[in-house]
Amino acid sequence: MSQAYAIEVSNRTVGIVVREERGFRFFSSERTFDILDGGHFRSAHAAERAARALVERRAGNWAAFTLGL
């Protein structure tokens, strides 16, 4: 039985994580987060932190992201 969780940033689903034997694999649903696609994380929370950190690093694109542009 697989376990999958949605990863949300600012009330938008940016991807999902699926449990694997030794952690979680991230699958992007937003182009902004493709850099994390396929990434392996120790926990679902770690994947969420990485997604939030990506938004913070790209603060110039934050308005476009939150407005869906």
Image (spheres, rainbow, N blue to C red):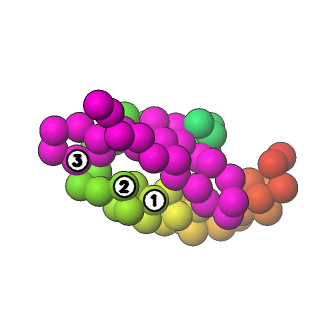
How far apart are the alpha carbons under marks 1 and 2? 6 Å
Query: Is disc 2 placed on a helix, strand or loop?
Result: helix
Answer whether labels 1 and 2 touch (C-beta < 8 Å): yes
Q: Tell me the amino acid under the disc marked 1.
A: Glu
Q: Position of residue 17 (x, y in %)?
A: 41, 43
Quarter of the image where the N terminus is located = top left
**Crowding near pointer 3: few (<14 within 10 Å), some, many (20+)?**
some
User: Between residues 5 and 67, which one lies in front from this camera angle?
Assistant: 5
Give the vertical position of 46 relative to 27 (above or below).
below
Give the residue at the far front of this rendering.
1
Residue 59, image quadrant = bottom right
Q: Quadrant of residue 48?
A: bottom left
The residue under the point 49% across, 57% down is 51
CA distance for labels 3 and 1: 13 Å
Tell me if residue 25 can be seen: no
Question: Residue placed farthest to the top in the image?
Answer: 1
Instruction: Say if 14 sits above or below 47 in the image.
Output: above
- What residue does disc 1 label? 48
- Residue 7: where, in percent of width, then height? 52, 52
Return the disc, 3 or 1, that comes first in the chain's sequence.
3
Estimate the spatial distance between the alpha carbons at disc 2 and disc 3, rounded to whole Å.
Answer: 8 Å
Query: For residue 8: magenta?
Result: yes
Residue extent of the magenta highlight: 1-28
Helix, strand or loop for the magenta stretch, by majority: strand
State left or right for residue 16 relative to residue 56.
Answer: left
Name the residue carrying label 3: 23
Q: Which mark is residue 44?
A: 2
